[in-house]
Amino acid sequence: MPVSNPGINLILGPAILAVIVNIFLFGIVFMQAVTYYTSSRYKKDSWAIKGLVSWVLLLDTFHSCAVVWGVWEYCINHFGDLVFLGTTPWPLYVLPLFSSASVPIQIFLAWRVKVLSDSWPVFGVLLTLSVGSGIMGFITGIRAVQTSNLNVFLPVQDFATLIPVADSWLGLSVVCDLSLTLLLFLYLRRSRTGLASILILQSIETASISTLNSVLDLITFTSLQNTNFHFVFALAQTLNSRDKIREYMDGINITSSVSLDL
């Protein structure tokens, strides 16, 4: 019986799986965006919310197209080229630059915590963690470009040189997302309005998925070197729809004078 090439299983396999997951999530993001833009809530939302949704959609569209091109290079242009399996196309190795764009979403969630806690120091800590992880992600992406010597493809073995700075980025991202998840749960749990349970589920879903992705990305990137397993988690991106939350907010008599909107 023929023996499969381990390079295909450990490098090409995870890359294709990551792109499939990413495109599936992009379809969800796109449909949520269409629903949002065509809803009556769109006109009522602030420019900040509209800009945040448009920013995520634009970034996700560009990066989804880029990673599909990367898989095309593996499967079509370099089909059967086992030497090429030892390289990584630029849409994959500059992923930290795209991940840094999640900072506005983290800041949005941090503002929710600030409104619920009425604490500027808490918001300041979360803001510092978010901006810090964004900066480290940007530095990681730049280091990857420098390591590639501005080439379109980066050798997979060179990822080992990025571990210190990449672990710093992912570590800060884990701490930030975990802090957001816990704080949102604690402060929303104190509320006695019918809106609380809905916001708890929505907020924890938002932050916990990011936390899980960051933790798994950190583990696989550090421990499974010379593979592309970490891309399965790094490429996962989500966008949360606010339409149902707004519908509940319209129908619930909120006694608190604090608004959860920007």
Image (tube, rainbow, N blue to C red):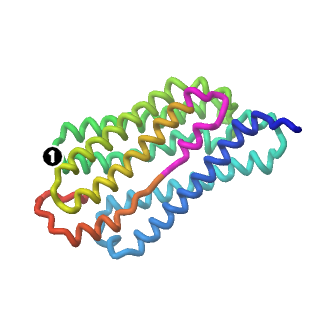
Point out residue 226 in the picture as x, y percentages from the top left corner. Answer: 67, 29
Magenta part of the chain: 221-237
Residue with the most extreme right position: 1
Residue 48 included in the magenta stretch of the image: no
Which quadrant of the rendered structure holds the N terminus?
A: top right
Residue under the image location 17 percent in, 60 percent down:
193
Point out residue 135 in the picture as x, y percentages from the top left corner. Answer: 42, 35
Residue located beneath label 1 in the image: 118
Compared to residue 44, the image places residue 188 above or below, namely above
Residue 235 included in the magenta stretch of the image: yes
Q: Nearer the viewer, residue 52 or 28?
A: 28
Residue under the image location 82 percent in, 46 percent down:
79
Query: Is residue 118 shown left or right of residue 222?
Result: left
Residue 242: quarter of image: bottom left
Query: Is residue 9 shown left or right of residue 211?
Result: right
Compared to residue 157, the image places residue 53 above or below, namely below
